[in-house]
Amino acid sequence: MRICGRLLKVVVCILLILGFCGCWDSRELNKLAIVMGMGIDRGDDPGTLQFTAQVINVGEIRTAGENGGGGGQGKGYVNFEDTGNTVFSTIRDITNQSSRKLYFAHNQILIFGRSVAEEGVTKYLDFFLRDPETRLNVYILVAQDSARDVLNVESNIENIPAQNIKSMVEEESAFTSQTIAVRLYEFKDSLLVKTKAAVAPIVEISQGSDGNISKINGTAVFKGDKLVGTLNKTEGRGLLWVLGKVKSGIIEARTPQGSLVSMETVRADGKFSSEITDDGKVKVTISIREEGNLGEQEGPENLSDLSEVAYLEQQKNNVIKSEVMAAIRKAQELDADVFGFGESIHHKYPKEWAAMEDNWDELFQQIEVEVKVDAKLRLTGRISVPAVPE
Amino acid sequence: MKLEKGIITNTQLMFLIISFMEFMVLAINFVYPISKESTWIAILVAYALVILIALGYTAIAKKYPGKNLVEINDIALGPFIGKIFSALYIWFFFEYLIHFSYYFNSFWITYIMTETPRIVFVVFLMAVCAMAVKDGIETIARCSVIFAILVGTMVISIVVAQISKMELSHFLPILDMTPKVFIQSVHIILTIPFCDIVVFLMILPYTDKNTQIRKPVLLAISLSTALMFICVLASTAVLGVRMGTSTSGTFAATREIEIAAILARVDVLIAITLLITIFIKITVFYYATVLGLAQMLKLRSYKPLIVPIGLIACAISANLYPSDMEQVYCAQYIWPFNASIFEILLPAITLVVIALQSVWKEKGAAE
Amino acid sequence: MFRYILKKLRFYELLKQDEKQQTEAEQTSKTSKTSQTAQTAQTAQPPLSKSLEENLKALQDVAESNDFVIRRFVFGKRIHAAIVYIDGLIDKELVNENVLKPLMRINLLDNSELPPSIDIDYVKDAMLFVGDIEAQSAFDEVIGKILSGDTAFLMDGSDKAMLISLKGWKMRGIDEPQTESVVRGPREGFTETLRINTSMIRRKIKNTDLKFETVKIGQRTKTDVCIVYIKGLAKSELIEEIRQRLGRIKTDAILESGYIEQYIEDAPFSIFSTVANSEKPDKVAAKLLEGRAAILVDGSPFVLTVPMVFLESFQSAEDYYSRPFFSSEIRILRFVAFFISILAPALYVAMSAFHQELIPTPLLLSMASAHEGIPFPAVAEAAIMLYFLEILREAGVRLPRPIGQAVSIVGALVIGQAAVSAGLIGAPMVIVIAITAVSSFTVPAQTDSESIIRIALLILAGFLGGFGIAIGLLVVLIHLASLRSFGTPYLMPLAPFSRSGMKDAFTRAPLWDMIRRPRGMAQDDIRQDRSSKPSPPKDDEEKPKGTVSEGSL
């Protein structure tokens, strides 16, 4: 009886505790609006912003298990839009339209509209850094015009535009490497450093065969937190060569006889080091190593001949060098240190940096750059002699 | 009269100390805003210092084998001053109990479950700790063996998973701060993670080889410092400049692990690891408080004190600071000095008194 | 105020009265006890009388049922005797052949060939063709032995009875134990008869150090309980402790070894059992050789072994009969299955309701679409399915064989599918519960504790997510760490860490490597020599006999 009494008391206590627990944090799956992409544009009134959230419409999504029954009639996503003064208040406002609370942990991309990017993005970033639900590995993009339109462009392969854009960014940086794929933490890192300029890929809407399609085209350059200019594809790849982030890509060159050859880059590595010369100027040495294979040739020359190989490698060197120089020139024109040369001086010469930091803008214009490229051609594919030889 | 009849082996003691210090392996957040990228250097310096201090603690324990801190104070310093010292120590342990409990709660609430009121976490955690304290030091030591190995494995695997994101350039610039700031960070690291092993002075007498405790204690400190060092190195390498801005550096670094798109967002596992380590920490402090209090009040067993102290601790630690920022401020500027009194000053006084007493005894014996 | 004082006075008065009554009651009980003991001492061992008829009448009065057979006969032409037995407990043919026949046959002899005087000792020494015979003169003992299946031989003129053990009743034959089937290894299982079980253990361990101690427990059932141990290996404190605990049992019925288990276990309120049981003699023999003790109970094929450690539930006999690599893999699998079985529903609920960020995005989308339109929250879904699983399992055991298998399989699949289609539960939940169910049978010794832990973890997960699960696991671990089974810590090779013990914990080291017994259990640690590792002969050594070399083919 004694033991029974004690046990009874314990059980009653447990039941009471469980009773007053309201399981505050429990969110059932069917009460979540899973956000896949977000976009920020400038609102109609000055000082406001327009926020677009792309949420998955779970009932319509075609998943692996369903055999087509009950799926695919409607759109797989829903875009919620709202305007407000700050990001957080706008997001909470969306609960007026949405039956579910937005859930950000699976968000893939964050697009800034051009208008917002030109104004300055810092004030919109703070929410994404502070909230525990949002993740720092979302991709940052800048829209050519308005983020909202980009998020409305459907793709034929993927169900959801945000998923489409994310895959495009990843594929792009893996296979063409003409634009840099930037995640939020990298973006924030660049913003934290005063002298480094942040970059982000640009996504635009263009006319496809049936309807609009979204395309990644070019890199946006920020100075401070404002958009100041763009790098086109060549310049974008030049930037990637320097940063060592080229994973693959095609380099076009001409043979001595003048026909076009496409070479695929398989591996690339880029390093730079800076030093302060005697007369106070900054000299940067960039060394790039690259390996590639012959992908396609127009003409009938036998390119597996060793002299041709050496010539092509030299052509590759020239192409890479020219892309890098183009990038540097454009950066100097925009007065934005996208490469991080300033930071490398900071790391190497911390004492002198304190003096140089403030007039880095002028110093950046007068940088001496030396580019050393070591490109190699390794394989020629399945055939060594072209289909129709000379 | 022994209040605690359990005996733990020296190996178990070592694992207990390791799992005790492993909490700070993952949660050493107060220092990051101060000594951003050079935290690892501060850890090395603090390690050198704590070895000296630990030698002091073990010297006190070896001088009176089989007696825990309260008894040592009574014998060494006389009944009146000894009681005051013991009371101060017990208050200190209790303070640590509630501070750590609060810290853990704010961590969990910030990152994982944002809406649950604090009291829920506090009550559940305290209930589990009370259960462990009731079962005695043997159970705690047995659990700690498993936990130490588990947490060590988790830390190593997290570090390994972060290798792809590490960049050596994030370590530079080194020591980009004034000496005063550096000394402040060393002080914080010394007092909060390292020197709270002073609580083990209550537990050391219950080992089976009372006089050979120096080796397990030093070994344990070295091993957990090594772990902490690796962890801080990894976090610095991943985060670099962002270290100072995040409220929890290790956590922020872990959030970015993405292996094959399946093992992404594994920070909940870190949080659970933290739960395990904080459990050991709170249990040891709880146990020391209860044991010391029972000893001072000359009770026959410490079991009746467990529930009252637990309830008081729950009530206080749920409302300890009005906001989390206050705790960070306190940890950076106020607590190191408060803790130094108990961790460094009081044991130093005890050591000096013991040394003087032995000198007097020798003189008396010589005469 | 006045009334208050009056109340107090009355209270004290009543208190004193109470005390007086108590002391009186104690005294009377003491005296009654002493008188009782005196009485029982008097009536403890009433002897048989010399008259046969009196004895038989006394026996008949006590027994009073028609399977109590008294067979009167005459032998030696003039001596009256009788055998008393219970029909059904004896081997009738043997009794007829070896007791009645030799005695009655001397009726055919001449008087001259008879010995001059025949007393009961002479009958025992020279005339009965039986092996197991003992003399007894106490009435209660005689009745007790008859009830156990002995045959009592009573002779007129003698106050002793001869108890002949010719037991033979119908019992289940030795066949494969149903709860522990193995792929490789002996397939014998214990039966319900104590003697057969002891003989099976004897056959495994042919050693004089193997000791059997039998006691009778249970005031009405008088069940035989036998403690088995190897003297010199098992700690004497352990055997003493077992004897003490068995001696403390004062109940009237022991029907199965489970009763004994519940009376002698260390932690009656814990969900984990601290006493192991087994149906296979090779398993019990192996445990005896490790220094443990076994308790056999007549009437039950389940033999208890003490002390028990947690990791024993994960070890099975055929681990040791197969080679180490596969056995280690299977053992690790068992641990994983154990954790899946307790954690799967709780993890699913915690992840889908609290920590959705842990789920990879495509999986989250399919889980979310499966969860659309389900009326219950995830906790309720999981709890319903869990109880349904338990009901199915229990029903499957009780159903008659031909229907049983079909219903359980069909029931699980069809009902699960129908519930999904009806929109009651989501498809992922069915999978989770199915995995849980299958995993829970991988570790048979822990199925009952598993189901309780599973439900507790599920409820905790439903309220507090990952925190709840961690708290629940912590509580279980602390509880396990604080348990002791007959002096051995329950988490033995892990908790007081012992390196030699870890050789048989999560993986199984090769047999030639396990040179020590589990620490702390036996008196003598070393099991075998270090040098018995098998290895191929080195180049300069002699090749083993019978090697076929290349040239000779």
Image: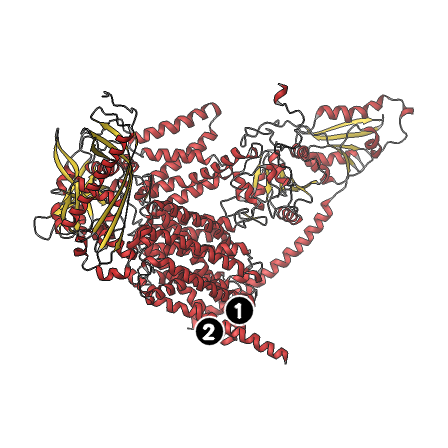
What element does badge 2 sit on?
helix
Residue at 45 percent of width and 24 percent of height: C403
Residue B147's x, y, as percent?
A: 46, 50
In the rendered view, would you say B229 is above or below C348?
Answer: below
The quadrant of the image that shows the C terminus of chain A is top left
Q: CA distance from mark 1 to mark 2?
A: 12 Å
Residue at 76 percent of width and 23 percent of height: C97
Left or right side of A261 for B259: right
- Which dot marks residue B71? 1
Residue C254's x, y, as percent?
A: 60, 40
1 and 2 marks in contact (CB < 8 Å) = no
Identify the mark nearer the N-term, 1 or 2: 1
Name the residue furthest top: C553
Mark 2 is surrounded, within 10 Å at the Cα level, by few (under 14), some (14 to 19) or many (20 or more) other residues, namely: some
Dividing the picture into quadrants, the one containing residue C306 is top right
Left or right side of A335 for B6: right
In the rendered view, would you say B355 is above or below A266?
Answer: below
**Residue that mark 2 sits on:** B84
